[in-house]
Structure formats: C-alpha cells, structure tokens
Image (cartoon, rainbow, N blue to C red):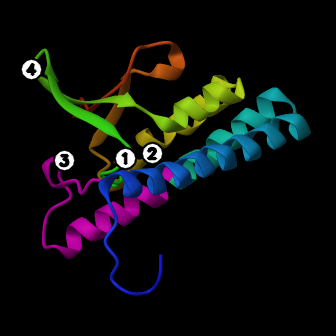
Amino acid sequence: MSEKNEMITEEEATRQVLSIVNRMALLHYSFAKTLVETLGEKKGKDLTRKAIDFYGKQVGKQVKEKTLAKGLKNLLENYQEDLPRFGWNIENVVVDGEPRARIHACNLAKAWNELGDPVLGRLYCHMDQAKYTAYNSELECIHVRNTLDGDPYCELAIRTKKK
C-alpha cells in the first residue's frame, strides 16, 4: 500500500492481520523451541514462561495507561480491548451468570498445531493471566477452555480475585 489514503477491503485487512499473527506464532515457537533445545525441557519451558509473563505484563501496563489516559479507572468494564478487530472470532457469552469471552478461531493455536507442538504454543496463552493482573491486580484470568488443550474453542473468564 502506498502512503496515500487507500481503502482496503475487510477481507484484505483480515488477511494482513492473520499474516502478522502467523509470524508472531512462529516467533514464539522459534524462541521457545530454541530455549528447550539449548537448556533442556524444564529450564527451557520455565524461561519461556518467564518471558511470556513479562510480555503479558507489558501488554497489561499499556492497556492500563491507555485506560487511565481516557480518564477512566482501570476496572474490568473499562478494559480497552488489545486484540485487532479483524482475524479473531470472539463471542461474548454468559455462563452460569459469568461473562466470558469465547474465541472460536485462534490463528496462533492453528499455527502451533500445524507445527506439531501445541504444548510449546500453549505457554504463550499464559500471557493473558499476566496481562490482566498488570492491568488491575484485583483481576484474574482463567482459561476455562483452550483449543490447545483439546477443547473446541478457547473460553476466558476474567473475574475479581476472591479474597
């Protein structure tokens, strides 16, 4: 695309987003695989988790800063979505009175499954816990379901921590 204000279709925007999502999946896989091969399975996975936790905290801090900059409190209802609109099939559902996000098509998981290593890919998913905790330490994120664990979709519950 040139620098002029050129309009693209939703289909093209989705294709562009999915291209970078696939690259991110490959980047995560490459780092995780290299760490496991270099340090051994336990140390490699532990270091990958540490890096993913750090990454999630960075994302959560950015979302918090954007929320506060709008004059809003960093409450769950003010959480500013950090995923692109295109390329994700997210459904908001209520299960047993609790609001949840259900992701029907995770292209990160698709890439890791195609690479034949959903276990290493699954380590990436822990960024969600770190992200929400960094946004607001009173919140917790639970992966109720995850396609990388064999579920038909991913389902996240974001709730206030029990005291």
Disc 1: which residue: 133
Q: Which residue is rendered at x = 13% and y = 66% of the image?
A: 72
Q: Can you say whether 89 is above or below 142 in the image?
A: below
What residue is shown with label 4? 97
Label drawn at residue 130: 2
Mark 2 and mark 3 lie on one chain; the one further toward the N terminus is: 3
Query: Residue 122: x, y in percent?
Result: 57, 29
Mark closest to the chain's N terminus, 3 or 4: 3
Whether residues under marks 2 and 4 lie with C-beta atoms below 8 angstroms apart, the answer is no
Q: Amino acid at mark 4?
A: Gly
Image location (x, y in percent) of residue 81? 27, 53
Q: Nearer the viewer, residue 157 or 84?
A: 84
Compared with 45, 76 (above or below) is below
Image quadrant holding the C terminus, namely top left
Side of 97 where 32 appears, left or right: right
Residue at 28 percent across and 36 percent down: it is 90
Local SS, label 4:
loop
Q: Is mark 3 in CB contact (under 8 Å) with mark 1?
A: no
Could you say which quadrant of the image residue 113 lies in?
top right
Circle 1 packing at 10 Å, graded few (<14), some (14-19), many (20+), is some
Q: Secondary structure at mark 3?
A: helix
Disc 2 and disc 4: Cα gap in Å? 24 Å
Q: Amino acid at mark 3?
A: Leu
